Amino acid sequence: MKLPTIPGPFAALLLSIGLAACDGKSSPTKENFAKAVQTYFDSKEAVCIFTGAVPFDAARYSFEERSAEPLVKLGLLTKEPTSVQDDGSAHRMVPGFHYALTDEGKKSYRPANPAKESKICGGKAKLLAIAQATSASDKPNVGDRVLVRFEAKLVDRPRWDDEAVLRPVHVEVLSTENDQYHGEYFLELTSGGWVVNPSLL
């Protein structure tokens, strides 16, 4: 018995449907969300401190001095007395300090463009669980987004990441308990599956 022939366009359509059914990357599952978050973790460092451009000068009692002092204490910056220009007068100099990177600081310093966004970074994180996710369509479209809340753990904490020293001034540093922390990211569906959308962090 001769089997019926399926016309070319219909065969292509059936094939695409079959491949879509086998490809579960777009499904709104915790497994896919977890993969997206861990991929993002793997692409970046877990702990960062905003420093701006280094080296720099700071007047005594200024916000810049206050921000720099914890980094001096942790061995990331050096500190030398100097004179700096008074913000209120182009001709008046006031006591201050010159800050520069130590050898350890140089290893962790991440210059940026613009320079004011430069950071000191290090460490890696591992996802422990997706704790919660906003609802999504069973058949989401490219561009759809979900908000996921997660639990994670620092698995490679930088030596200099002393929260008791840093967080009173650098509130951007992770707050952890037993190296664990929680957070949330927006995920967006792309043609290759779910990814963290950095523009929404």
Image (tube, grey):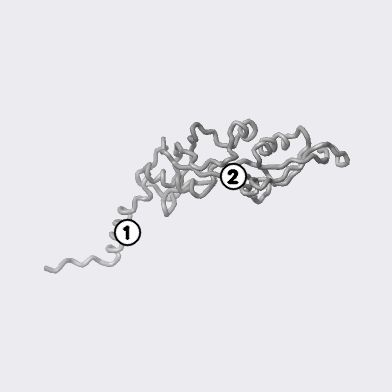
Name of the residue lying farthest toward the right: 91
Left or right position of 159 against 32: right
Indicate the quadrant containing the N terminus: top left, top right, bottom left or bottom right: bottom left
What is the x, y in percent for residue 95? 82, 36
Report the side of 16 relative to 89 (left or right): left
Name the residue nearer the viewer: 3 or 159: 159
Q: Residue 167: percent from the left, percent from the top?
A: 61, 33
Residue lying furthest bottom: 2
The amino acid type found where label 1 is placed reads Ser
Left-right relation of 173 to 71:
left
- Figure label count: 2
> Is residue 164 depicted above or below 127 in this figure?
above
Nearest to N terminus: mark 2 or mark 1:
1
Which numbered circle lies on residue 52?
none
Inspect this view and state whether residue 75 appears.
yes
**In which quadrant of the rendered view does residue 78 lie?**
top right
Q: Badge 1: few (under 14), some or many (20 or more) residues near its Cα, within 10 Å?
A: few
Res. 118 in view: no
Q: Residue at x 59, y 45 (%)?
A: 121
Distance Cα–Cα, label 2 vs label 1: 44 Å
> Percent x, y for residue 28?
38, 44
- Which residue sits at x=21%, y=67%? 5
Assign the C terminus to one quadrant of the image.
top right
Task: Give the residue type at disc 2.
Answer: Cys
Give the crowd class for mark 2: few <14, some 14-19, many >=20 residues within 10 Å: many
Q: Nearer the viewer, mark 2 or mark 1?
A: 2
Residue visible at 44% across and 52% down?
190
Closer to the camera in the image, 86 or 197: 86
Is label 1 in a helix, a strand or a loop? helix
Residue tagged by mark 2? 121
| Residue 16 numbered tag | 1
